[in-house]
Image (tube, grey):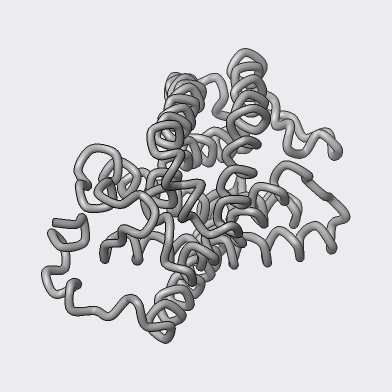
């Protein structure tokens, strides 16, 4: 039984293979994250910290909230994929479940929102993050292909657990801007954030191990487009992104500085 079956027993009757259903789920996901962004901006106006931020930082604040919500969703689905799911493991290439369709559709909607928001922000504020753009665009392309071709849902849902660090990262930045880096809560959150990146490495290694176990069937049957996107992304996060972010967050735990906006000399208030 899939994760969604426990929440919505009738989910098995939904025809997720129909293009119109996939498109609808993706669109609803996109609208949901746009609403989270707008709600975050509305609620932020109630706090003095938010009001003192410049426009670029306010956008980053709202994006952090959206990413945190998405990260929580991914963590739940990822844990289900690793410890509860048994259907996708039967066929790592073409196995699908209602939960995997939901997760992949929601992810495509999220990355549609992310790529659009980040691109507009980069153009308006002339600030370009190579790592962030590479990660988001490859993810959007890869998950879109997975959804359309209906292959590799196993790898797609397990890969979502890599977003486990996102909620902690959002809390880290928001509390930095609020001048709360000297609090016990921030230090505990930062400790958990650093170790979530350590766990990301465990997840990445587990996917490499599954690749080793099923290499013959992966090489023979996995669609080429998915193969290229999956292992390009997996190579990048394993050997570049996760180690880099682990290092940066470890340094930040010792020296609580907002390095996302070093160009505007934004420092935290630790007094």
What residue is at 66 percent from the left and 51 percent from the top?
60
Task: Residue lying at the far top in this picture: please name it.
Answer: 254
Reply above or below: 179 against 2. Answer: above
What residue is at 42 percent from the left and 67 percent from the top?
150
Reply above or below: 153 against 101. Answer: above
Q: Which residue is at the front of the view, 271 or 146?
A: 146
Which quadrant of the rendered structure holds the C terminus? top right
Task: Residue lying at the far bottom in this picture: please name it.
Answer: 20
What residue is at 65 percent from the left and 54 percent from the top?
138
**Apparent side of residue 160 relative to residue 82 in the rendered image (left or right):** right
**Apparent side of residue 80 relative to residue 102 in the rendered image (left or right):** left
Where residue 67 appears, x then y in whole percent?
A: 52, 51
What residue is at 44 percent from the left and 52 percent from the top?
156
Where residue 199 appears, x then y in whole percent?
A: 43, 25
Which of the 4 image quadrants contains residue 268? top right
Reply above or below: 29 against 237. Answer: below
Reply above or below: 6 against 248. Answer: below
């Amino acid at each position: 039984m899939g994760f969604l079956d426990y929440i919505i027993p009738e989910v098995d009757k939904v025809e997720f293979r129909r293009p119109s259903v996939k498109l609808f789920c993706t669109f609803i996901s996109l609208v949901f994250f746009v609403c989270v962004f707008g709600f975050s901006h509305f609620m932020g106006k109630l706090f003095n910290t938010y009001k003192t931020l410049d426009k670029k930082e306010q956008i980053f604040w709202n994006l952090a909230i959206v990413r945190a919500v998405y990260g929580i969703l991914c963590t739940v689905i990822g844990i289900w994929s690793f410890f509860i799911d048994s259907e996708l493991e039967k066929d790592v290439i073409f196995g699908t479940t209602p939960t995997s369709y939901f997760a992949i559709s929601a992810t495509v909607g999220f990355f549609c929102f992310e790529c659009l928001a980040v691109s507009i922000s980069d153009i308006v504020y002339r600030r370009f993050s190579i790592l962030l753009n590479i990660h988001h665009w490859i993810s959007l392309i890869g998950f879109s292909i997975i959804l359309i071709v209906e292959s590799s849902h196993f790898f797609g849902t397990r890969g979502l657990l890599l977003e486990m660090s996102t909620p902690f990262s959002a809390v880290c930045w928001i509390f930095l801007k609020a001048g709360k880096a000297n609090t016990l809560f921030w230090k505990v959150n930062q400790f958990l954030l650093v170790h979530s990146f350590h766990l990301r490495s465990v997840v990445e290694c587990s996917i490499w191990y599954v690749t080793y176990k099923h290499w013959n069937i992966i090489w023979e049957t996995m669609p080429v487009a998915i193969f290229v996107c999956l292992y390009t992304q997996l190579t990048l996060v394993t050997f570049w992104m996760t180690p880099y972010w682990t290092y940066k967050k470890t340094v930040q735990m010792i020296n609580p500085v907002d390095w996302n906006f070093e160009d505007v000399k934004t420092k935290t208030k630790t007094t």
